[in-house]
Image (cartoon, rainbow, N blue to C red):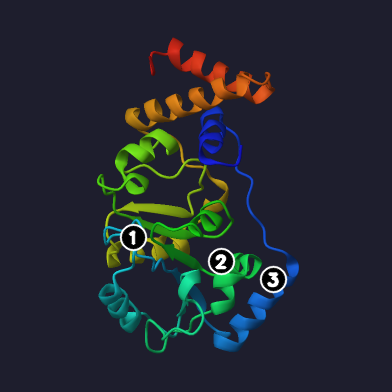
């Protein structure tokens, strides 16, 4: 149950998240690397997706926006890092002047996640590695532009597979993760940095609740369909718990 249907069912029945962890050796390497780059600053990573496949122009980063962002970033406090798409990580010209790239992180899973764990904030657009950060311990910011002409980033796909409506957060993620529905923008980044710097709560331990009726309806449907598939092979306690939650919601008139 580590794919999204199973994650949605886990979210629906109220499980607590279990987080990815990188091995100690990779964390040590990441700390050593950070110390050599900038020992007195907090790191912000930007993970790129540079493939043209299945990209209507909204999955790649906005180069002009990020050039402006990096030029205005307070370098006395923050150090940006780029983790390139695996296909272009080696032997490519840097994307930005004076912003270090970490090719090893693009081709080595443990190193990639260790860098995410040691960073203050990790920023993504839709790409595979974002899953590591979304279900890890450290903060991330995910910019998502839906496009209904491309299945994998359509509203229908997110409803059917993730139980999400526009404006909701990824299932089973914690409050130190933020999904922004729209283009990269400075306001969202500044708000996220401010939240992480000023919050007195441990946001990494607080799961997002389901706050709107559409997300509840979509989540319920995905969880039930997943559970019905499971019941073909036997009955486990977690399957029963999904049905208990569904019954309770029915009795309260919150779902049909």
- Mark 1–mark 2 Cα distance, whole angstroms, equals 20 Å
Asked where in the image residue 198 lies, by quadrant, the reply is bottom left
Q: At which x and y percent is residue 192?
A: 39, 61
Q: Label 2 crowding class (10 Å Cα cut-off): few <14, some 14-19, many 20+?
A: many
The residue wearing badge 1 is 59
Q: Label 3 crowding class (10 Å Cα cut-off): few <14, some 14-19, many 20+?
A: some
The residue wearing badge 3 is 26
Asked where in the image residue 157 lies, by quadrant, the reply is top left
Q: At which x and y percent is residue 41?
A: 52, 81
In-front residue for pair 138/4: 4
Kind of element beneath mark 1: loop
Q: Earlier in the sequence, mark 2 or mark 3?
A: 3
Which quarter of the figure is the N terminus placed in?
Answer: top right
Above-or-below relation of 40 to 28: below
The residue wearing badge 2 is 116
Above-or-below relation of 69 to 167: below
């Amino acid at each position: 149950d580590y794919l999204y249907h199973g994650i949605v069912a886990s979210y629906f029945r109220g499980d607590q998240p279990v987080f990815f962890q990188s091995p100690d050796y990779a964390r040590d390497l990441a700390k050593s690397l950070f110390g050599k780059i900038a020992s007195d600053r907090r790191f912000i990573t930007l993970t790129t997706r540079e493939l043209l496949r299945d990209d209507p122009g909204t999955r790649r980063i906005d180069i002009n926006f990020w050039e402006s962002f990096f030029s205005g970033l307070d370098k006395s406090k923050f150090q940006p890092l780029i983790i390139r798409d695996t296909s272009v990580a080696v032997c490519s010209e840097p994307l930005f002047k004076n912003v270090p790239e970490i090719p090893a992180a693009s081709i080595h899973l443990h190193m990639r996640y260790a860098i995410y764990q040691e960073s203050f904030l990790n920023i993504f657009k839709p790409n595979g590695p974002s899953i590591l950060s979304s279900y890890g311990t450290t903060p991330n910011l995910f910019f998502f532009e839906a496009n209904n002409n491309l299945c994998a980033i359509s509203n229908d796909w997110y409803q059917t597979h993730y139980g999400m409506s526009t404006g909701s957060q990824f299932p089973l993620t914690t409050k130190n993760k933020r999904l922004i529905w729209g283009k990269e923008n400075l306001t969202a980044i500044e708000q996220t940095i401010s939240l992480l710097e000023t919050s007195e709560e441990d946001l990494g331990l607080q799961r997002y609740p389901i706050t709107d009726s559409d997300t509840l309806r979509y989540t319920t449907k995905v969880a039930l369909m997943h559970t019905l598939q499971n019941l073909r092979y036997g009955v486990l306690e977690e399957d029963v718990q999904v049905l208990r939650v569904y019954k309770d919601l029915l009795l309260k008139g919150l779902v049909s």
